[in-house]
Amino acid sequence: MSVASSRHFLQIPGPTNVPDRVLHAIAKPTIDHRGPDFADLALEVFDKLRAVVRTSADVVIYPSSGTGAWEAALVNTLSPGDAVLMCETGHFSGLWSELASTLGLRPETIAGDWRSGADPGAIEQRLRADTEHRIKAVAVVHNETSTGVVSDIPAVRAALDAADHPALLLVDTISSLGSVDYRHDDWGVDVTISCSQKGLMLPPGIGINAISAKALLAARSSTLLKSYWDWQPMLDSGKQGYFRFTPPTNLLFGLREALSMLLEEGLDEVVARHDRHAAATRAAVRAWGLEILCREPGTAPGTHHSSALTAVVMPPGHDADDLREIILDRFDTSLGAGLSKVAKKVFRIGHLGAFNDATLLGTLGVVEAGLGLAGVPHRTGGVTAAIAELTGRSGE
Amino acid sequence: MSVASSRHFLQIPGPTNVPDRVLHAIAKPTIDHRGPDFADLALEVFDKLRAVVRTSADVVIYPSSGTGAWEAALVNTLSPGDAVLMCETGHFSGLWSELASTLGLRPETIAGDWRSGADPGAIEQRLRADTEHRIKAVAVVHNETSTGVVSDIPAVRAALDAADHPALLLVDTISSLGSVDYRHDDWGVDVTISCSQKGLMLPPGIGINAISAKALLAARSSTLLKSYWDWQPMLDSGKQGYFRFTPPTNLLFGLREALSMLLEEGLDEVVARHDRHAAATRAAVRAWGLEILCREPGTAPGTHHSSALTAVVMPPGHDADDLREIILDRFDTSLGAGLSKVAKKVFRIGHLGAFNDATLLGTLGVVEAGLGLAGVPHRTGGVTAAIAELTGRSGE
Amino acid sequence: MSVASSRHFLQIPGPTNVPDRVLHAIAKPTIDHRGPDFADLALEVFDKLRAVVRTSADVVIYPSSGTGAWEAALVNTLSPGDAVLMCETGHFSGLWSELASTLGLRPETIAGDWRSGADPGAIEQRLRADTEHRIKAVAVVHNETSTGVVSDIPAVRAALDAADHPALLLVDTISSLGSVDYRHDDWGVDVTISCSQKGLMLPPGIGINAISAKALLAARSSTLLKSYWDWQPMLDSGKQGYFRFTPPTNLLFGLREALSMLLEEGLDEVVARHDRHAAATRAAVRAWGLEILCREPGTAPGTHHSSALTAVVMPPGHDADDLREIILDRFDTSLGAGLSKVAKKVFRIGHLGAFNDATLLGTLGVVEAGLGLAGVPHRTGGVTAAIAELTGRSGE
Amino acid sequence: MSVASSRHFLQIPGPTNVPDRVLHAIAKPTIDHRGPDFADLALEVFDKLRAVVRTSADVVIYPSSGTGAWEAALVNTLSPGDAVLMCETGHFSGLWSELASTLGLRPETIAGDWRSGADPGAIEQRLRADTEHRIKAVAVVHNETSTGVVSDIPAVRAALDAADHPALLLVDTISSLGSVDYRHDDWGVDVTISCSQKGLMLPPGIGINAISAKALLAARSSTLLKSYWDWQPMLDSGKQGYFRFTPPTNLLFGLREALSMLLEEGLDEVVARHDRHAAATRAAVRAWGLEILCREPGTAPGTHHSSALTAVVMPPGHDADDLREIILDRFDTSLGAGLSKVAKKVFRIGHLGAFNDATLLGTLGVVEAGLGLAGVPHRTGGVTAAIAELTGRSGE
């Protein structure tokens, strides 16, 4: 029942629905990347990006996917054989760990159950044990896109401080930046990794690093091979409003627009909007009688519900991908699949980026409709519960 | 809680949400309206428009609003002092009648209660009484946009035939074409009046007439003053793929695209989609315990629920405009106001044009949320009922 | 050698090349024409339009072609049988005169040779002879699009004043507004007629009237039949930021943008730019050894070269349409045809609207190339002469 | 005299003017990169890209700049310490050589004068001397963007064959692909490097490798560190229509459209169009009495004029950047700067990508105008000469 004339509902946890303002910005004629108009564009983008990352530090923008931004964070700060402490939060923390291995680093992973955030206590314990400071970086995924769990970055920072450990703190904010509260400076993060296609409301194609002074210092002694990802020439050119190599000009037009939109709305308001939509989504899931993958906050250390997406556990014997296929075919709505360990066991509802109440209720409505059509045992009334949550009438 | 980054829900009964394909078509560079590419465009648009009106007759396209298309139908077929039989179905039938008076015609109106369609029996009776054939035209609004009531055009045609009356049959399909089943040739209509911004999924700016051979013949003896609206020079130039005066080129780019989309989906499928969404909307309204303005089919002659919009009656003591304002402010969703006689007493939910299940459920969701916030007495569960209707599970 | 990937050069004297900013504005999602955002749009458009027309008087915007705006000016101010003094300047003054006849008016035309402007002396003489004031309006085309001749409106105004005649002064600025200096208030014009697709840099679809207090007064006693074009209800609704009938919303988005662009550049600068491009075009034509249709200023009363277009006379025995076809086929550039009396004898180069030096030189370059390919006797070096004119080096 | 309303002329040798069709494609809503629609997109893009590269081999697409595609070619095929034979053709061959050094390779460079192509004789001689086959790859820039010189790739291939040397042949086609004749398979190239923003008529953001079977084999034993650029996982996922990491979806929409446009026009026709425009540009430069940086074909081995850009040498004592600034300020036209060794000594006219005769003549026109304004000694009549060349009348 997909209708060619109406808009697809892209409710995966990224890429997200790109606002018309951003699509129009991207469709402007390309300009000379060595000319004065480009310098204005670049400097404005850097400034606004700093505001959204809540930092006064340096930022670097790559024509790349988020994977490239992961790689950039590692190759600029570390050297072959360095140990990196990683926290298993889900599929993406695992991929990052694999990347570290490929690059010749030695990731040490604190195991996790894919339903909890990074455990600050475990991190502190491991760092205290590392009396020789072989661990050069602690790498944490802020919002684990595969599970809908947010790790507590201030608590992780506190763990490093409590252990008095000099490791760098690297944080993947790929699916949190622009949706979930995040503060590079206040939280003492050394490298923030992000990209364009989630909370920043752009199509994919831009990778981002924000870099603390400590990380910049570490970069001087890093010996991992690097050229494309090398921060220093990017920073040198960026200060003058151009790029070391040809920049993704049209995506930067879009980034300027998207950052402006976030700042116009207000970062606190953006976060509150996502919190609200996430709460309404959870209300719907609970009303359906289904389980949320993320543990309840308080029941596992450093664990918070994601305001960017909600991963829903299927009842035993029901395949999440069958449900997703029905919802795509019948309702032209894309949901996120369960990945690797939770494949077919969960589906993910993205509620990040450009999103409003009506779109949320439409999304939850077709999920409820799909549950019925797929024969998944559930109670109806999920949308009713979400409405109650949205309107502050859930207690009635 | 309007969010600048997300898409407004434009759920008034027109203008409707314009699909991206159409918006992109409209944004193409304007071309020479006397060149060969334009002729291809014009001839394709005329052909596809005939297919959507389900006619092999002539069509004329004006740079105008729908009001202009109303005027064109009258000034081309009638002469000063001619009687026109009109049927009071709501606000728009009334405006059309006023227009006829302004033009020096003599509208005779069969009164109505704004909850029913044109009464074929009353029409037949009036025409039988007009033994001198002073009535030159019967003018009916197919889908009364102010009330959500559809009149039964085949029954009206049958009434003319039963009375053996030579009056022309003029039908306003402004808010039905492209949404509600309509057949110019099969139903023996003489002039079909329409425009761009409803079921045709375009912005406003195009007025349309489809013209039977009988209407063309009548035009030869019509003496009402006309120039801009004069059919003949438009038909003469149109046959060669150009326009008598500068055409609305970019809107025609959009019209070509929109007509193609309707024909790709299939007219029967388009009608079925709207029927389904209308049924789900009515299920929601009933679940809320609110009243639908349109009488139940069968309880009033020639009366059908509209598949393009649903007008909902507010409980006594509650102002529909207050509700609409809350829904606009809080949920960035526009609903239609009650007009003139039913101002503040009803609100109208548009479910026509480019529209899918998710958008419908989002719309109904924010209406339900708004009813709560506005303190309008209602039962929750409207969306749940709509989902049941959409998935064919309402009997469970 | 038309290349699908590159931009068509639309160098007819309208519709003109629509700037990307305007095309993007037109492609925004349509909004509720009864909502608060629309009122802001409408009021801003009216204000900026007044600034561009250089008036503090009322303006009315129609969903229509320019032909509709012509009709509106006549039906609102005049009554059946009224005499209108018209000046034959070319094809379009002729069409306007025909329209007046069709509407039941009595046009009296001062003959012209299609190479000169309206003759103020002849107008004064005719008005002085009209001692009974049967002539109710003087109608002049400011920039005759078919010939590239500009009439001297202040001199026409002076003629009316010298004759102490109460006739209204109606001026068609369809192809001058936004390109050629024009001042509704300063020049004592009663009705300014214009439309969207020329100097206003929009696609077609909008008709415009600006209306003096004297014209508004005349409208009260006008008895020509009118409804769609009736000023009064348009003015009443416009003051409150809405339209009497559904407005052409997306074209208004574009109009707001286009008016802003003109005002950002500065009206004087816009006029100077067009003057400069026209001078360079004439330099090229003279260098080719071809004749300009418009008489030299000073050789015919009230006659000025148009800064919006230049009509070029073909040498005897050469068909302008053959040349135009070669230039379209080989160079993907559209030029204007000669119309009616000068069909095939002249071609017209449009240099109005969104236009810069590079585009002008490209246009003149392909005209010169086309003259060669078509075997039209000419000297080369037209572009060289245009460059000299543009750079102020023509005297070297 | 830059006019905000008219289109900037972006005549640098890339990024190039992006056609409206491509801009519209890029502005489509982003889709799920794991869904069926995306697989269709990806497979179509790979197929059409192969057609444009004229290969049946594998292709890989990166979210990256062209610099990334350079790096990918090296890190996938080579190992630390490997010798790479490079040819100094200009600024970009030098940057590529620096990159090789940074990656731990040993570039050996055949010196050049920045006015000639890679010398096949010198390559053969060097390879014959390399009896131990320490040279693992020969890296040549096909169209040196900094000089406007095209190297003769078939002759380079013949040099490798004559020397019976097993080195891989790596060719940078960044500014030639889609403009200058190029044949990956016929010419025996092992890795073709390219990107989006030149002849492919896209904004920047996509890097491309086409990979011969021999190069794939070499990749198996390559030990340079790689992750993001690693071919194998990209090829594995690409075969199934998805990307190893999030793809630049909207740029791929644009790439599909741009490749379709090239194939619709026909690759031979595209090449012929660029040849023609380049010839006309050289005719203009010669008419001005200025020198072309590229040596005349035949006077230096392996040297051809570029059909993508023309680098023009300034007369002694005149600064090319002053000229460029005047042309940008006065005529809103961007030209390419001289880079490093030829900074301020040359300027570059880009005539690649979406480009037609009118745009070329406009570009040449403003260059001629700029030469005058800047006081650069020259003869006028460059555009006249270009017109003669374009119309095949230069011998008259």
Image (cartoon, coloured by chain):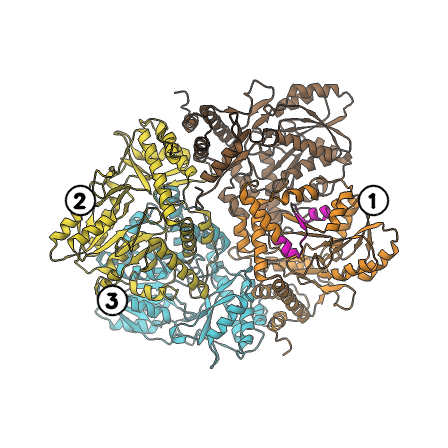
Chain colours: A brown, B yellow, C cyan, D orange
Q: How many marks?
A: 3
Q: Position of residue A160 (x, y in %)?
A: 69, 22
Q: Which residue, given by chain and number where applicable, does mark 3 sit on?
A: C105
Q: Position of residue C155 (x, y in %)?
A: 36, 68
Which mark is in front, 1 or 3?
1
Q: Which residue, given by chain and number where applicable, does mark 1 sit on?
A: D81
Query: Which image quadrant for residue D330?
Result: bottom right
Q: Which residue, given by chain and number where applicable, does mark 2 sit on?
A: B111
Which mark is in front, 3 or 2?
2
Mark 2: secondary structure: loop
> B240 or C49: nearer the eye?
B240
Asked whether residue C164 is in view, the answer is: no
Query: Which image quadrant for residue A176?
Result: top right
User: Is residue C38 shown above or below B370?
Assistant: below
Asked whether residue B121 is in view, the answer is: yes
- Left or right of residue D246, residue B132 in this image: left
Disc 1 and disc 3 on one polypeptide chain: no
Residue D64 lies in the magenta stretch: yes
Quarter of the image with the C terminus of chain B is top left
Residue, x 35% and y 60% (percent of image)? C192
Quarter of the image with the N terminus of chain B is top left
Q: Chain of mark 1?
A: D
